[in-house]
Amino acid sequence: MNIFSNLLSQATQSTPPKKQRRGIEIKSPREIEIMRQSAKIVATVLKEISELVKPGMTTADLDAYAEKRIREMDATPSFKGYHGFTGSICSSINNEVVHGIPSAKKVIRTGDVLKVDTGAYYQGFHGDSCITIAVGEVTPEAAKLIRVAEEALYKGIEQVKAGVYLLDLAGAIEDHVKANGFSVVEEFTGHGVGRNLHEEPSVFNFRTREMPNVKLRAGMTLAIEPIVNAGSRHTRTLSDRWTAVTVDNALSAQFEHTVLVTDIGYEILTDRTKV
C-alpha cells in the first residue's frame, strides 16, 4: 500500500493500535522470521487472486476473498480500518493509480489493467505487496506497461545491499521506466515496513533531493513499489478521498515487494514463486 505524502510523518497501524516508533528499525533475526510469515501470507493471497480473477467478478468479491484467506492464516488485514480505509485490498483499475476502494458496483472486465495491493499483520509485523493483473487479452500498450512496471521493481531490488544508497534504487527504477517511454508517479512512494505498515525511510522511485539519501543496513525491511503511468506522471485524488487516478486518463501499473536488506544483497519476502 502506498503512503500519502501528508501521512509520511504520522504513519501508524491502527488495528491493533501500536505506539509509533521513530527512526529506521533494524529487525532482529526473530523479527525477520515473523516477517517472513506475514509476507508469505500476503504472497499466498496475491498468487491465489491472480489465478481466480476473471471478467464479471467485482472488486468486492476479491476483497472478501482476501480478507477470508488472511484471517484463515491467523493474520489480520493490514489495510482494513487504516486511516478509515474500508477494504482489505486496494483494487485499482486502468487509470486508477492507487488506493481504489473495493466495491460491489465495480465489475472487472476483459482488457482491464487491475492492480491488487494487500497487507497482512501477523504476530506484530506486516507484510505488504502489490501486483498488476492483465484481465484476459489486453492491448499491446497495456501489456508493455505491465511488463515494464514489473521489470522496474526488479531493477530497483537488484540494487539492494547493505552499504548501497536508496537513491541508487530510485535511479535504476526511473531510468528503466523512462527508457521505455513511460513515467514514474512521484506523489506516492515506497516505505519501510515492519511493526507499522508505513515506517521510515521513504523509498523513492525517482531521483530527488527532497529527502535524505539513506544508506541501507542489513536488517532493514522495505516495501519497494514503483508506479508507472503510460502518460503523464501526475495524478489527482477523487472525491472519495482515497482513489488516485491519472490526470490524462492514461493507464497505470504497479508492483510491490517487501524486501529484506542483507549484508550480501537482499531477500524478497513476498516472493510469490515460493508459496
Image (cartoon, rainbow, N blue to C red):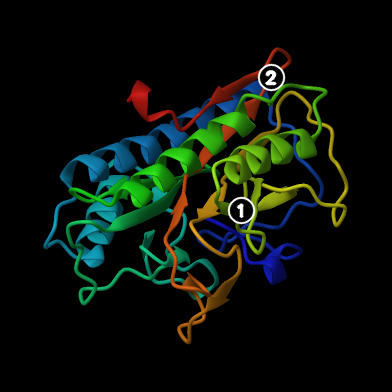
Q: Is residue 124 left or right of residue 92?
A: right
Q: Amino acid at mark 1?
A: Val
Q: Residue at x 24, y 66 (%)?
A: 60
Mark 2 lies on residue: 262
In terms of secondary structure, where does tag 1 sit? strand
Q: Quadrant of residue 25?
A: top right
Q: Amino acid at mark 2?
A: Thr
Front position among marks 2 and 1:
1
From mark 2 to mark 1, how far is it between C-alphas? Answer: 27 Å
**Comes first in the chain, label 2 or label 1:** 1
Residue 241 image position (x, y, % from top left): 51, 81
Residue 184 shows which numbered tag? 1
Q: Residue at x 33, y 42 (%)?
A: 46
Nearest the viewer among 20 and 197 is 197
Residue 26 image position (x, y, % from top left): 74, 32
In terms of secondary structure, where does tag 2 sit? loop
Q: Quadrant of residue 42?
A: top left
Q: Is residue 216 left or right of residue 58?
A: right
Residue 90 image position (x, y, % from top left): 40, 61
Q: Does 35 appear above or below 138?
A: above
